[in-house]
Image (cartoon, helix red, strand yellow):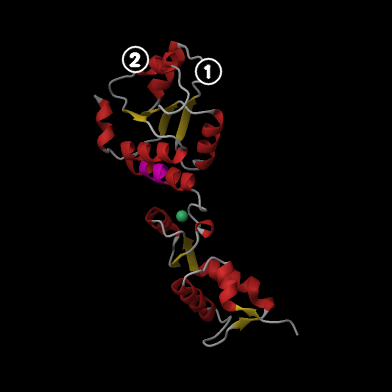
Amino acid sequence: MTEAVPIDEFLAGEGFITEWARYQGRAILEQAGLTRAGKTGMAPGKLAQARAALARGALRTCGDPDCARLGSPQQDGRLLVEGPPESCEVCHGSNNRRAALVLAEACRANGVRRLLILGGTGANHAELRDLLTGKDVSLRCIDGSAQTVTKRDALRDLDWAELMVVWASTPLPHKVSVSFTDERPTTLPMITVARRGIAALCREAAIAVSGGPKRAGRQ
Ligand SMILES: [Zn+2]
């Protein structure tokens, strides 16, 4: 006879770490008829079904308020269960992903779709695009260290964009940035992000898109 798997251990492995989360997990398993009150072990043959029941019954998040908010549209009657970051169904434990989702949500809520990013490397841009895949936000990214920009190209990008973000902490030669800043139409909002990192870029762009203080750049 195969040995029963301790339910608490199984739940911990599935991201139900805290006492409250384990309680929630047990409730889901009991409701699915996979265990009952007082039982501590489960037959290994039931684990696949138990995993499926947990996926149907719980939305796992890292406990970050942004993830709870961003996850609510997909909660769909499931219990909100807080666990370790890597089990979060929203950010998957990534600050960059969470911040990109916050930006995408701000863009959606404010009808902004086209962002022009000045600065950052090709790798940054690729990651940012990847995180925003399927989010109805288009990016044009200028890698200042690799690109020379003609005035015509700059004007075309400025005309296209709905927000210009100058990523000042990254390699961005003055001659590249002025091609854009000098020609910026007064109607195009601009922000400067001084902090490094994709999460910082996304957070500050999200504030600007939502009409935060930095939208004052629109003068
Ligand atoms: Zn999360």
Can you tell me whether the CB of the residue at mark 1 lies under 8 Å from the nearest atom of ligand 1? no
64 to the left or right of 217? right
What residue range appears in magenta?
102-107
Work out whether residue 162 can be spotted. Answer: no
Q: Quadrant location of the C terminus?
A: top left
Label 1 neighbour load within 10 Å: few <14, some 14-19, many 20+: few
Mark 2 / mark 1, whichever is N-terminal: 1
User: Label 2, label 1: how many angstroms apart (C-alpha)?
Assistant: 18 Å
Q: Would you name the residue on which mark 2 appears?
A: 182
Can you tell me whether the CB of the residue at mark 2 lies under 8 Å from the nearest atom of ligand 1? no
Q: Position of residue 24 (x, y in %)?
A: 46, 74
Q: Quadrant of residue 39?
A: bottom right
Tell me the residue at 52%/18% (across/down): 147
Tag 2 secondary structure? loop
Q: Would you name the residue on which mark 1 appears?
A: 147
Q: Is residue 62 above or below residue 187?
A: below
Q: Quadrant of residue 78?
A: bottom left
Residue 184 on the magenta segment: no
Residue 103 on the magenta segment: yes
Tag 1 secondary structure? loop
185 to the left or right of 54? left
47 to the left or right of 183? right
Amino acid type at image mark 1: Gln
Q: Is residue 167 above or below residue 60?
A: above
